Amino acid sequence: MRKALLLKWGFMFVLIACFVRCSKSGGATAPGTGTNPGGGTTNPTQSPVQKDVPAVDNAVKTFMSTWSVPGMSIAVIHNDKLIYVKSYGKMSATDTTSIKNASLFRLASVSKQITSVAIMKLLQDGKLTLASKVFGTGGILGNDYSGTYLGQLYDITIDQLLHHTTGNWPNDGYDPMFEHTSYSQPDLINWTFNNYPDRNKRGQYYYSNFGYCILGRVIEKLSGKSYDQYCKDVVLSPSGISDMVIGGNTLADRRPGEVIYNGQSNEDPYNMNVTRMDSHGGWLGTATDLARFLAHVDGFSGVADILTPATITTMTTPSSGNANYACGWGVNNLNTWWHNGSLPGTLTEIIRASNGFCWVMLCNTRSLDSQMDTDLDNLLWPSVNDTSTPWENTDQF
């Protein structure tokens, strides 16, 4: 199961997503057949009644039917104003509780953008540079960890961790983040440095969850706070977000308002150490939470960004190892940024388009068929690109 899980997400995601966006300015999807969305909103300025956009609701309904998605939430902003937020469906086949706009979802690898922005805040504050070394004497983490192969890693930089170009710990069937789920983060890091020799492939792109786990530890070292507390203090709270948290592992750990995750193809959404994934895949949030986050880092002028324009440029500049991956964001030459997230029971995506639109899509299941990823990526592009779509451009974050 683990190999199917890991090969599903990672380098294949980037190839698929980059192909879709590099070949056109927006995806395309067939119209669907309507829906009856439910739920309230977490935005206190949201209008009491929101006009339906049938093209959006129809597309979501068709996607959910095609891929057996029990429940889903979306949020759309334009010029940093919330123009559409809706939730659809239910928790599971046996729990018919409606998904609501305040429902929390596992974000999976959409967590990496939170980590990237937190690192950019440290860069902006002069606490590190992209060239900063991570391990060994003079490195940020110094000798906090140990292992037979650690000495081979002393040249690794913050830049390489952000861009997935250390050449190490790829998200394949042997991703260390999915090994020894009972280990703490320090124990897993030490175990990895004892069991994964350096691949000697600096500069080559290999999508790495473990690399972002290390970035979380960098944040803790330089801030003197826990990873999640620093992110709340400098990224989430300044973006108007108060309810995002790191998720738990089992159904018993389910947070108030959190959805139920539905496995397909015998996947078990509650057989992972999600809490340990904090900085690469551990966050919970609502669609509106993520829309607020995008509004405060997207470079558009509707609300003040929490990063300077120069830092945003740094964050969205790709490496020579992959022209379509920047610091935790997929990017293309159309100035579109995006990322998806995928775990058993979870599929998510955020998109920032150059036309001033940003949107969020959160699902409480996934299929191992990569076409589901592509269909989610294409889901809202037709409505976003259609200038006649009747959005209600009224609500400022």
Image (cartoon, rainbow, N blue to C red):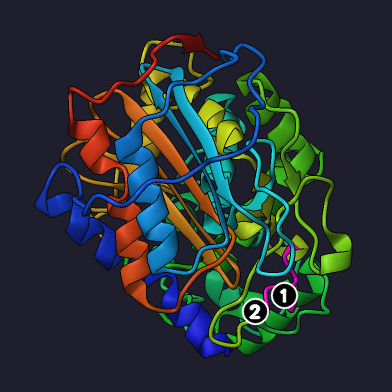
Quick check: 138 left or right of 201?
right
| Residue 344 visible to an observer of this rendering | yes
Question: Mark 1: which amino acid?
Answer: Met
Q: Which residue is mark 1?
A: 272
In whole angstroms, how far apart are the C-alphas of marks 1 and 2?
7 Å
- Which of marks 2 and 1 precedes in the sequence? 2
SS for dot 2: helix
Q: Tell me residue 141's x, y (percent).
A: 69, 55
Question: Residue farthest to the right?
Answer: 252
Q: Which residue is mark 2?
A: 178
On-image quarter of the N terminus: bottom right
Q: Does the segment drawn in magenta span residue 296? A: no
Q: Tell me residue 101's x, y (percent).
A: 63, 36
**Figure label count:** 2
Q: Of circles 1 and 2, which is in front?
A: 1
Instruction: Please state the extent of the stretch shown in magenta in the rendering.
Output: 268-274
Asked if disc 1 and disc 2 are in contact, CB closer than 8 Å, the reply is yes
Quick check: 202 left or right of 128?
left
Residue for point 44% across, 9% down = 394
| Above or below 236: residue 267 | below
| Above or below 226: residue 67 | below
Residue for point 89% across, 65% down = 252
Label 2 neighbour load within 10 Å: few <14, some 14-19, many 20+: many
Q: Name the residue nearer the viewer: 190 or 76.
A: 76
Quick check: 209 left or right of 226?
left
On-image quarter of the C terminus: top right
Based on the displayed image, in which of its 4 quarters is residue 211 positioned? Answer: bottom right
SS for dot 1: loop
Quick check: 365 left or right of 275?
left
Residue for point 38% across, 46% down = 34
